[in-house]
Image (tube, rainbow, N blue to C red):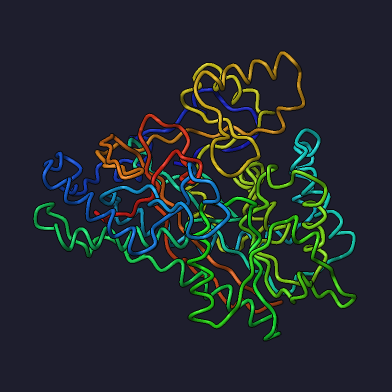
């Protein structure tokens, strides 16, 4: 049964999350049962738990599953200072194999969709026009995009490193997309390590846990992302050029980034440099032929691990740097158009009836994407707003922001929507409403700063994808690996770097 995601008025009841029994497909899905690992249904005995935590912490320290400790000065600027293990789940989270396959299967289709949508400048500008009026950050991005359109700027070589995030609704037993990230898709390095950690622990304690390490899928995203960057660098065809990683001034997740750059150098022989937006503004220039020079080095690929938040642009210097890079012929990952495709508003527009058909031709591909779309509405939809005010627990109110900690839940939705109505505010265009997904909570052991907490937890699955095209030749369009994030079931937000969740892997059931 398709969820109505149109912006036209619909009956209030149809805006609430859909449940089982509405179609043969749903009935079949809801009847499916899958075996659950021993660790989900029972507590791990205290003696075994202590051994698992100890061994896991040693493994993290030896294998680089680390971040900077926020309580230690310089831990976000100087490598090797104030290291602490990344927050992680002690054991993998069970996940149905058929939903895992579904998420992997649609990754190349989403890659293709991003590329096709990015080419339609009018669609991007028109869809975000009302948002532009009330959201200064989106407005500045659109201004840069508009300048590129005016210049008829062509991006012959296009590179996207994306991550599509999903939750599995427990009652409907359907996989729904939460968002599609087109800029700074983090944890390619550390997510691989968590999979290795869990396999290692299960290999040692599998008999006691009644788990099989072969059910934890291998995760090669860091190698595949390095491969994509190297192939893009090769297409640029300048052996002395570098990959430039755009970073924040303070970055406690730097080791996740260093894992990727290390693979890029050791496997592919490609050098990288790390620069902030302010440094790029101070050191950068575009030569008459379009070459981007930063600090005297030619940049082949610009890989953004910053620039997705208004906080990354504290002055005009940072905006000047972003414009400079867009004007150059360096390969941008992402380009300004790819960046805009990842906004919440575009996600909502793509979920409208007949919009996917504008960008994709294959009917099967369109059906596969639609199957994982949750309910999405603009605040122009009076029935959606009415339903959200009456039953806010079934919705999430999302602004045009990335990075975690920005969404609005529960009674705060009602208060925000009523305030916007009373003010007659144009600020409503800065938000979208989304159907809230309710995953099944499972017993989990979450480890932060060396302390293990037992909680009922829910998880969000991210599937990484890489897309590389040079003119009409698609060089790479693949699913590359996964990220599992697990959080206390009482927590609304889900970002690891923002402090809400821990890194995890999956156990196929």
Residue 232 visible here: yes
Left or right, 330 with respect to 435, comes to right
Left or right, 119 with respect to 101, comes to right
Between 141 and 367, the one lying in front of the other is: 141
Residue at 69 percent of width and 57 percent of height: 276
Between 50 and 244, the one lying in front of the other is: 50
Residue at 63 percent of width and 27 percent of height: 9
In the picture shown, does residue 282 fall above or below 430?
below
Left or right, 209 with respect to 273, comes to left
Left or right, 499 with respect to 313, comes to left
Image location (x, y in percent) of residue 251: 57, 52
> Which quadrant of the rendered structure holds the N terminus?
top left
In the picture shown, does residue 369 fall above or below 412?
below
Image location (x, y in percent) of residue 54: 22, 51
Residue 30 visible here: no
Residue 190, image quadrant: bottom left
Image location (x, y in percent) of residue 295: 76, 70
Between 184 and 87, the one lying in front of the other is: 87
Residue 158, image quadrant: bottom right
Image location (x, y in percent) of residue 163: 52, 56
Residue at 74 percent of width and 46 percent of height: 313
Residue at 70 percent of width and 75 percent of height: 300
Residue 160, image quadrant: bottom right
Q: How many marks?
A: 0
């Amino acid at each position: 049964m398709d969820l109505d995601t149109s912006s036209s008025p619909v009956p209030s009841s149809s805006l609430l999350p859909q449940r089982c029994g509405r179609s043969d497909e749903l009935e079949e899905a809801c009847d499916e049962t899958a075996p659950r690992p021993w660790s989900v249904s029972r507590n791990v005995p205290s003696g075994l738990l202590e051994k698992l935590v100890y061994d896991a912490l040693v493994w993290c320290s030896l294998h680089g599953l680390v971040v900077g400790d926020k309580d230690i000065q310089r831990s976000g600027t100087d490598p090797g200072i104030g290291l602490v293990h990344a927050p992680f789940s002690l054991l993998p989270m069970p996940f149905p194999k058929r939903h895992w396959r579904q998420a992997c299967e649609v990754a190349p289709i989403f890659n293709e969709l991003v590329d096709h949508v990015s080419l339609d400048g009018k669609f991007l500008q028109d869809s975000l026009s009302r948002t532009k009026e009330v959201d200064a950050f989106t407005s500045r991005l659109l201004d840069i995009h508009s300048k590129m359109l005016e210049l008829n700027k062509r991006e012959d070589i296009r590179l996207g490193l994306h991550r599509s995030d999903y939750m599995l609704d427990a009652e409907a037993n359907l996989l729904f997309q939460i968002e599609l990230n087109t800029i700074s898709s983090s944890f390619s390095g550390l997510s691989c390590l968590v999979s290795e950690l869990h396999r290692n622990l299960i290999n040692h304690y599998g008999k006691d846990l009644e788990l099989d390490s072969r059910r934890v899928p291998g995760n090669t995203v860091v190698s595949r992302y390095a491969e994509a960057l190297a192939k893009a660098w090769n297409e640029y065809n300048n052996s002395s050029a570098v990959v430039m990683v755009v970073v924040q001034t303070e970055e406690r997740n730097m080791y996740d980034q260093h894992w990727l750059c290390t693979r890029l150098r050791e496997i592919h022989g490609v050098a990288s440099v790390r620069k902030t937006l302010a440094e790029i503004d101070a050191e950068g220039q575009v030569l008459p032929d379009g070459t981007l020079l930063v600090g005297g080095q030619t940049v082949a690929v610009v890989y953004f691990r910053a620039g997705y938040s208004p906080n990354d642009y504290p002055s005009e210097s940072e905006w000047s740097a972003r414009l400079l890079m867009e004007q150059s012929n360096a390969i941008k990952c992402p380009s300004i158009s790819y960046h805009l495709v990842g906004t919440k508003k575009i996600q909502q527009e793509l979920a409208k009836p007949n919009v996917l058909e504008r960008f994709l031709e294959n009917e099967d591909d369109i059906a596969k994407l639609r199957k994982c779309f949750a309910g999405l509405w603009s605040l122009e939809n009076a029935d959606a707003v009415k339903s959200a005010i009456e039953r806010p627990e079934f919705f999430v109110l999302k602004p045009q922001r990335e990075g975690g900690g920005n969404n609005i839940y529960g009674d705060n939705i009602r208060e925000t929507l009523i305030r916007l109505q009373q003010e007659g505010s144009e600020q409503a265009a800065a938000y979208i409403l989304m159907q809230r997904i309710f995953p099944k909570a499972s017993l989990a052991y979450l480890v932060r700063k060396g302390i293990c907490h037992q909680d009922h937890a829910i998880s969000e699955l991210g599937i990484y994808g890489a897309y590389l095209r040079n003119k009409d030749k698609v060089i790479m369009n693949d699913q590359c690996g996964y990220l599992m994030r697990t959080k206390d079931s009482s927590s609304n937000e889900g970002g690891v770097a923002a402090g809400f969740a821990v890194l995890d892997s999956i156990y196929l059931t």
